[in-house]
Image: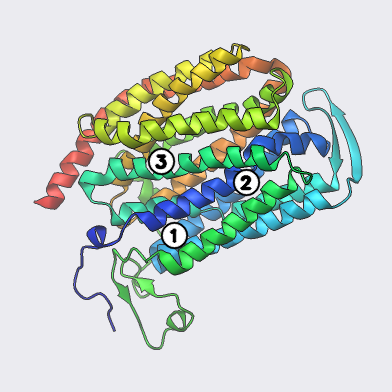
Amino acid sequence: MTLNNSRLDQKQKIPLLPILLVNFIGTLGFSVVLPFLVFVVTKLGGNAVVYGIIGAVYPAFQMIGAPILGRWSDIYGRKKILFLSQGGTVLGWIIFIIALLIPLSVITEINIAWLGAFSLTVPLLLLFLSRAVDGITGGNISVANAYLADITEEKDRNKNFGKMSVSSNLGFIAGPAIAGILGFTVYAELVPVAAAAVLSLITMLVILFYLPESSVHKYTEDPVDIKKVMGFENKECYNPGKGRKIPLGDVLKIPHVKFIFLLYFLIFLGFNFFYTAFPVHALGKLSWSVAELGIFFSVLSFLMVLVQGPLLGWISKKINESTLIITGNFILGINFLMLLSENSTIIYLSTIFFALGNGLMWPSVLSLLSRTAGKELQGTVQGIASSLGSLASIIGLIVGGVLYSNYGVYTFLVSACTIYLVFILSFYLTKTQKYCEKSAAAEKA
C-alpha cells in the first residue's frame, strides 16, 4: 500500500510555526542554564578547564548520535526522531537536578600545571552524565534543519533558515533573562534547571501533537513488515530491498560539500574558544554576577534577532549566500578582537559586531549546505555536518579552557584568527554558489 500517491507540494502546505516553536523552546530550555553554569561548575569544585570539559561532553556524545539520528530521520521521518531526541534532553535535565540536590562529596583533589587545581566531586560526575545523555540523543538541530529544508522552497531557503536562527535567538533572549530572575530565589540554580526540564517536556508535547511529518518523500507500507507494526514507516528514499547505508565516501563525492564541511568545522572551533573563555572571563576578570552575564547574553541575542529577522530577510533578496558569508566573517572577527579589552562598554559594543557578523554568516552557511546536499540526503549531510560541529566543539571547549587558564584574554585572539581564516577561505564559495544556482536551474528545466 502506498500513501501520498499524489505528489502534494508539502513545502507549501506545512507551516513553519511548529518547527520554529520547537526550536525556540529547545533553545530557551538550554539558555536558561547558560548564565550560571560556570558558577555551578566552580561551586562544585571545578575550574575553567573542567567547565570546558563539561561543555565538551555534550558535543562528544552528539558526534556519535547525530549521524545516526540524521540517517534515521531520512528513513523513518523527522518527527519521530525529533521526539526521541527531545526525550533524551528531558532525561538529561532530570540528572542535572539530581546533581544539584545531592550532598557535595569530594572524590579526589587534582593539581596539574596545565590543568590547574580542582576537586573531582560526585555532583560534577553527574553533570558529566547529564550532558552525555542529552548529547547522545542530541541530533535535534541537524534533524530540525533537515525538516526545514524538506518544507522550504528554493527561493525561500535563506530567509527560512534566517527565521530558524531568529527562533533560536529569541530563546537566548528570554532564557538568560529568566535565569537572572529565577537565580535570585532561595533555591538559586535549582529553579532555572527545573524550568529547563519543564520546557523540554513541553517541546516533546509540541512535537507529538502539533508538528506534522514533513512527508516530502512518499511513505510505503508493507503489511507484513514488522517496522509498520511498530510505527516506523519506511520513506521512499529508503527501500528495504534495495536501500543501503550511504557510505561517507559517497557523501563526500557531492560537489563542494567537503569544502563547506571544512568551513562548518572551523566556524564551530572559533566560536567554542569564545564560549568556554567568556563566561570564565566574566566571572573572574570582569567580576560579573549571574544577572549581569544573563543581561549580556540577552542583549546579544536581541541584536541577533534584529539582524537575522528583518535585516537578513531584506538583504538576502539582494545579496547571495557566498557574499553574506564572506562579509559576515570579516565583521565577526572584529567582535573577538574587541573582547581583548576589559572595558565593559567596549565589550557591550562588540555585541553589535557579533550579531551583525554571525547573523549574516551562519544562516547563509546553513542555506548553502542544504542546497548543496540535495533532497535525498538532507538528513545524512546535516548529521555529518553536526558531527563535525561537535568535533570542533569538543576541541574548542577543552582547548579554550586550557588556553584561558594559561593565557587569559588572548584566547579571544585565537577565536579572531580562526574566523579570519574562514573569511579568507570563504572566497572559494563563489564557485559553490554558481554550482548550486546551476543545479537549481537544471531541476526546474
Q: Amino acid at mark 2?
A: Tyr
Q: Amino acid at mark 3?
A: Val
Q: Amino acid at mark 1?
A: Arg
Above or below, 122 against 338 in this view is below
Residue 346 percent across, percent down from the top left: 54, 13
Callouts 2 and 3 close, C-beta under 8 Å: no
Judged from this view, the residue extending furthest toward the left is: 445
Callouts 1 and 2 close, C-beta under 8 Å: no
Label 1 element class? helix
Tag nearer the camera, 1 or 3:
3
Please tell me which residue lies in front, 96 or 239: 96
Instruction: Give me the C-alpha separation between circle 2 and circle 3.
Output: 23 Å
Above or below, 6 against 99 in this view is below
Q: Which mark is residue 166?
A: 3
Please tell me which residue lies in front, 157 or 322: 157
Tag nearer the camera, 2 or 3:
3
Label 3 environment density (alpha carbons within 10 Å; few <14, some 14–19, many ≥20):
many
**Which residue is label 2 attached to?**
58
Which quadrant is home to the N terminus? bottom left
**Which residue is label 1 attached to?**
71
Residue 419, visible in the rendered structure: no
Residue positioned 40% across, 75% down in the render = 233
